[in-house]
Image (spheres, helix red, strand yellow):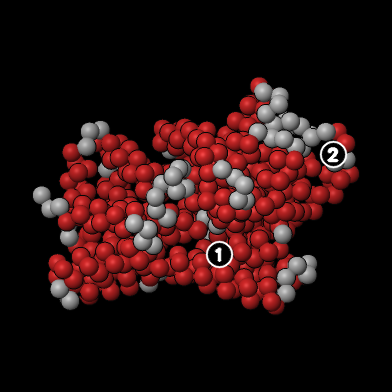
Amino acid sequence: MNLTPILMFITLFISLLIGFPISFGLAFISISFAVVLWGMPGVNLLISAAWGTMNNFTLMAVPLFIFMAILLEKTGIVSDLYDTFYKWSGGIRGGLAVATILVGTIIGAVSGVVAAGVIGLGVIALPQMRKYKYDNLITLGSITAGGTLGQVVPPSLNMVVYGAVAGVSVGKLFTGGVSIGIFLASIYILYILIRSFINKDLCPALPKNDRASFFEKILSLKNILIPGILIILVLGSILLGATTPTEGAALGCFGALLYGILSKRIDIKIVKEISVQTFKVSGMVIWIILAAGSFSGVFSGVGGNALMHNLASILPGGGWGVVLFASVLVIILGMFLETIAVIMLIGPIFSPIIVSYGFDPLWWGLVFMTLLQIGYISPPFGLSLFYLKGVRDDIEISDLYKSSLPFIAIQIICISILMLLPEMVVWLPNLLAK
C-alpha cells in the first residue's frame, strides 16, 4: 500500500498545528514531496498543476466579487438594509434576530463574500439586539449563521472556485443556491420564532414607543431599492445567460461604484483604500488556490487519487457510503482549513468519484457548498466565529462556540433533506436550462 498520499496529509496537519499559514504550508509540502520523489524535474509537475489551476477565466470573478463586497461595506448598504427590516419586524418577539437573518441573506445575494455579511451584521445588529436584551446565544448565533448565508446564496465566491475546479456550471450552481439559501434562511427564522414564542423573555419585542410608524416603515423600503437593483444586475444577468459569472461580477462592481459616487458615500481616497484591500484579500485567496492546486497535482502524482478510489470501493453502502464519507471529511476539514483550501483539496479528488457512482454533479456541488457552510461556524476555527470576535473584543469565544451549535444542527438537518430530496435543489437549474 502506497502511504505517501497519507503522509502528505499528515504533514499538512502538522504544519497547521504549528501555525504555518495554509497557503505556504501547502506550497512547501508540494515542493518538498515533488523534489524528494522526482528530483528537480518534479518542479515541472508543480508548474503544470499551477498553470492548469490558474488558467481559468472563471477565476477572474474572484477579485471582482471581493471588490464589490468591500465597496458595499463602505457605502453603508448593510446599515440601510438592517434599518428597514428592523422597523418592519421589531414589533414581534425575535424580530431583530429575524431581521439579521434576512439582511444576511440579501448581503450574500449582493456580495457573495461571507466576511462582508458577518462583519457588517456584527457592527450593526449586535448593539441593537443587546440594547433590547436579546438572549446572548441567539444574538451571536443569528449573526454568524445569517452572515454565513453568503456561502450558499449566489453569487457565492466559493461556488465560483468550485465550478472552476470541478467543471460544473457556475450559473447552475448559482441557480441551485437560490433554493438552498431561501430554505436555510426560512428554517433559521422558524427556529428563532418558535423559541421566542415558547420563551417570551428570550427575544422580547420592541417597546411600543420604539416601534416605527406605518409611514416610517413604508419610507424605509427605499433602502431595499439599490440592493434589489444590484441583485438583478448580477444574478439576473448570470441566471438568464446574458453574462458569464465574471462579466456579471464586473457589472455588479460598476453598479455598486456608481451608487457610491451618486450617493456621495465614497470618494477617490476611499476607492483607493478599497482597491488596496481587494488586492490583499485577492492575493490571499489566489495563493491558497495556487498552492492547493499544486498540492492536488502532487497528491495525484503519488497515487493519491487511486488510493481514494480504492478506499471508496471498500466503503459500506456503495455510492451513498462515499457521499457520507466525503461529507464528514468536508465538515472536519472545514473546522481547520480555509474553505477555498477545502474545495481545492476535496473537490478534484472526491467529486469525480461521487459522479462515477451516478450522482448528479450539480447536486453534489450544491451539497458540498452547504457542507462548507458548517465549517464556517464550527468550533474550534470556524472563520465566521473569528470574524465576529474580531468586531467585538467583549465576546467570549466559549459563547460563540455554544451559539453555533443549534445552527449547526439545523444545517445538518437541511443537508440530510437535500440528500434525501435532491429535486429540491436541482429543479430550478434544470427548469431554466430548458
Q: Quadrant of residue 179?
A: top right
- Disc 2 or 1, which lies upstream in sequence? 1
Q: Residue 399 placed where, x, y %?
A: 55, 39
Residue type pointed to by label 1: Ile
SS for callout 2: helix
Q: Quadrant of residue 132?
A: top right
In the image, residue 212 above or below residue 154? above
Q: Is residue 341 left or right of residue 42?
A: right
Asked whether 208 or 395 is in front, the reply is 395
| Residue 312 seen in render | yes
Q: Is residue 22 left or right of residue 370?
A: left
SS for callout 1: helix
Label 2 packing within 10 angstroms: few (<14), some (14-19), many (20+): few
Q: Is residue 351 left or right of residue 207?
A: left
Q: CA distance from mark 2 to mark 1?
A: 36 Å
In the image, residue 319 above or below residue 30? above
Asked whether 413 or 393 is in front, the reply is 393
Q: Tell me what residue is drawn at x 75 percent, y 67 percent.
A: 265
Q: Tell me what residue is drawn at x 64 percent, y 39 percent.
A: 139
Q: Residue 249 placed where, x, y %?
A: 57, 65
Q: Tell me what residue is drawn at x 75 percent, y 54 percent.
A: 80
Q: Which label number is shown at residue 210?
A: 2
In the image, residue 136 above or below residue 117? above
Asked whether 277 or 420 is in front, the reply is 277
Q: Which residue is mark 1?
A: 66
Q: So how many labels did they put on this image?
A: 2
Q: Residue furthest top?
A: 198
Q: Residue 416 placed where, x, y %?
A: 43, 33
Asked whether 180 or 404 is in front, the reply is 404
Q: Residue 11 placed where, x, y %?
A: 25, 56
Label 1 packing within 10 angstroms: few (<14), some (14-19), many (20+): many
Q: Tell me what residue is drawn at x 18 percent, y 71 percent.
A: 35
